Image (cartoon, helix red, strand yellow):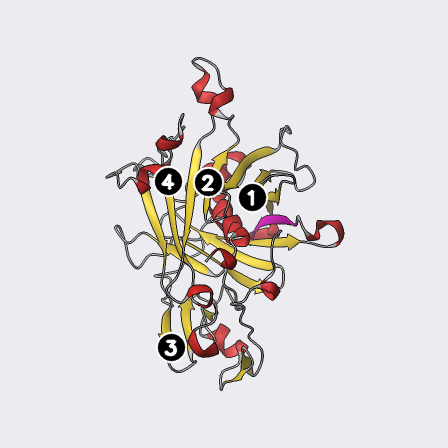
Amino acid sequence: EDEDEDEEPSRVETSSSSLSGRRTQRSSREAMDDSVAPTSEAEGGKAQLAVRPVASYVPAVIDTSDLRAFLMRPGPSGAMVQCYIQRRKTGMARLFPTYELYLKEGDKFLMAARKRKKNKSSNYLISLDKDDLARNSGNFFGKLRSNFIGTEFTLYDKGSNPDKVEGTDLVMARQEMACVLYKQNVLGARGPRKIKVMVPDVDEDGERVSFRPQAADESMLERYKSAQDDDEVQVLKNKPPKWNDQVGAYVLNFNGRVTRASVKNFQLYNPSKDPEAVLMQFGRVGKDAFTMDFQHPLCALQAFGIALSSFDYKIACE
């Protein structure tokens, strides 16, 4: 079940005059003007506002004439592809909501995802048609799978399970697009999340390293865990929020793209390449509305999969 923030212990609300029930001089409108957005609660019940600006934040110029190619193509360098996610969870969809990804520009639909039923671990199917979320459909575009306790996630493209690929048809085997690892924070459920993301490296020509692991120990996650010095993988981390005495909260600067408190809010960067450049940011702007922005080396499918893991990851696991 996808739990809403209403059910999460580290939920923080922003309203015109309060943060988590505590009086403050700053309104949520002022917080938005200053481009900060909440993440979760801190010690002593203080609110956490979501820390550092996106260096030279510039919207990207988008070409979706070939949609499938666009969704797999690494985003531009130095310019953000701006998207938003709408969560649909009414009626029977309450336990298995649909997540729809749109471009901000023109509200163009890109992809949709929904958790598959009757799976022991979380397994999200990603489709090019929000009304056709079948595994055997021609619209099937990828899947996100978690481990049993929901702290590790792996994103695949639409390729086949390597166990079901015969002989020399390995090119038909699924590609590993991203791995997401959540770790406990020293503050426990009340502190901001710790996220590490492994993605294949992209060369100067925009070509992504192809990962088609035939065994578990060949996966990006296992290679990372075994401390391999891996030039073929980029390791991204979430920017740590900084405490702001003025607002009594941890803050992240989303340049106005995130306006609501949520433990799901995060920004990713590559500390080994550029500690200032935000490569992806995700956060809440409404009860069931979230923004998702990304740039090189991530593509739309990778960013969507990482965002889906944030919806699924449970604070209770900490």
How many angstroms separate mark 1 from mark 3 (CA)?
36 Å
Do residues under tags 4 and 1 come within 8 Å of each other at their CB atoms? no
Camera sees residue 62: no
Three-letter amino acid code at the position of disc 3 = Asn
How many angstroms separate mark 2 from mark 1 (CA)?
11 Å
The residue indicated by pointer 4 is: 221
Three-letter amino acid code at the position of disc 1 = Ser
Q: Residue 41 location in percent, x, y? A: 47, 71
Q: Quadrant of residue 3?
A: bottom right
How many angstroms separate mark 4 from mark 1 (CA)?
17 Å
Q: Residue 110 location in percent, x, y? A: 58, 43
Is 102 magenta? The answer is yes
Do residues under tags 3 and 4 come within 8 Å of each other at their CB atoms? no
Three-letter amino acid code at the position of disc 4 = Leu
Q: Residue 231 location in percent, x, y? A: 26, 38
The residue indicated by pointer 3 is: 244
Is 284 on the left-hand or right-hand side of 181?
A: right
Do residues under tags 2 and 4 come within 8 Å of each other at their CB atoms? yes
Three-letter amino acid code at the position of disc 2 = Thr
* Mark 2, other Cα within 10 Å: few <14 / some 14–19 / many ≥20: many
Camera sees residue 45: yes
Secondary structure category for the residue under label 4: helix
Residue sitting at x 56%, y 73%? 13
For this orientation, the residue located farthest to the right is 91
Secondary structure category for the residue under label 3: strand
Front label number (1 vs 3)? 1
The residue indicated by pointer 2 is: 154
Vertical placement of 66 versus 81: above or below?
above
Is 117 magenta? The answer is no
Q: Residue 25 location in percent, x, y? A: 49, 86
Secondary structure category for the residue under label 1: loop
Q: Which mark is residue 122?
A: 1
